[in-house]
Image (cartoon, rainbow, N blue to C red):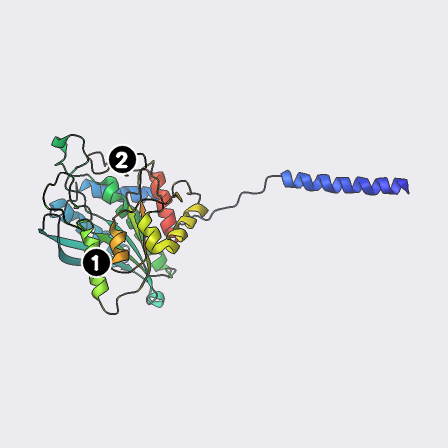
Amino acid sequence: MKELKKYIGFLGLLVILCSLSSCNKKQPAQTVQRPAFSADSAYAYIQAQMDFGPRVPNSAAHAQCALWLSEQLKACGAEVSFQMGNMTDYRGHQQQVCNIIAHFSVPQYANRPHILLGAHYDTRPWCDEEPLHADRMYNVPGANDGASGVGVLLEVARQISFKIADTTLYTPVDIIFFDIEDMGTPSFYTGMERSDTWCLGSQLWATEYANKANSQQYQYGLILDMIGDPNAVFPMEYYSSYYAEGYQQLIWRAAERLGYEKLFSKQLGYPIVDDHYYINYIAGIPCVDIIHYDIHNNTGFPAWWHTRDDDMKHISKTTLQAVGEVVMSLL
């Protein structure tokens, strides 16, 4: 009987040791299914915009770039229109606005509420954050502040074209390239202070949308701005949290699943008046901003912001890939 007990005890010990051994074995890594997106393509779209020169409103480069953008969107299967109008700038002068609106859908899903994706394509006329006053009247090149968001959305449009071809675009998408986002009051201006001088294109779009009966319904919107820097960090911008917290959480969870939780910080960011603010406040569409914010700089933005240094050396394909995958995961 003692021998039997010893044997049973020995078997029990073996079971325990085997179970401990299995616990210590490395489990196979979970495969993350990555959405199709090409950072090389997005980078090329950014470079193509830069080749026009600064896209300052009322310049030849701005007009040429607008036509080029519409051609790229049409080539991806979009219905494209221009929204024209006039808005009052920081001096009280009228500025002509040209928003570029692209609509993507397949017939069987065309009546579903849309997702709105946006970025601004204009560049700031003044480098008013330059330390030398003599350099402040140069145009901002706008690689990050302008071209980066547009470049990522052009690659998103290219990927959407494949979804249209095989009828797997289950949610209609509108991509809007907003004009005159970056002509807000310059730091050197000494005249009368006016309100709402930034984001004139999105103000125009949001106002017309709010005034239209039976307007197109949107689930939510997403704005991309300054999303190309190799050291970018995207905190959870305050207005996005206030107006569209559920969708902001959705986007940041998507980033976490893809392994980009360091890039998409869960820290609550400062309120930023960007295109999303007016889409939320005027149009009433919950809209989230993905925007680079730098807590180590006294402006809250990267050192190249609104300077002559906003060029291609601050564009990282790694960052573009991360943002592009997050956007594509939403579709």
Q: Which residue is mark 2?
A: 298
Q: Which residue occupies the foreground of this view, 15 or 240?
A: 240
Q: Residue furthest front?
A: 192
Nearer the camera: disc 1 or disc 2: 2
Horizontal side, residue 182 vs residue 117: left or right: left
Give coordinates of residue 184: x percent, y percent.
17, 46
In the depicted structure, whether residue 229 falls above or below residue 101 = above
Q: Quadrant of the N terminus?
A: top right
**Residue 331 in view (yes/no):** no
Q: Which residue occupies the foreground of this view, 215 or 278?
A: 278
The amino acid marked with disc number 1 is Trp
Dot 1: element: helix
Classify residue 75 by image quadrant. bottom left
At a point 43% along the width and 49% down the height, the residue shown is 253
Badge 1 crowding class, 10 Å Cα cut-off, few under 14, some 14 to 19, many 20 or more, is: many
Q: Which residue is mark 1?
A: 205
Give coordinates of residue 206: x percent, y percent.
23, 59
In the depicted structure, whether residue 213 falls above or below residue 269 = below
Q: Quadrant of the C terminus?
A: bottom left
Give coordinates of residue 260: x percent, y percent.
41, 43
Classify residue 291 by image quadrant. top left
Q: Earlier in the sequence, mark 1 or mark 2?
A: 1
The amino acid marked with disc number 2 is Asn
Q: Residue furthest top?
A: 132
Horizontal side, residue 206 vs residue 166: left or right: left
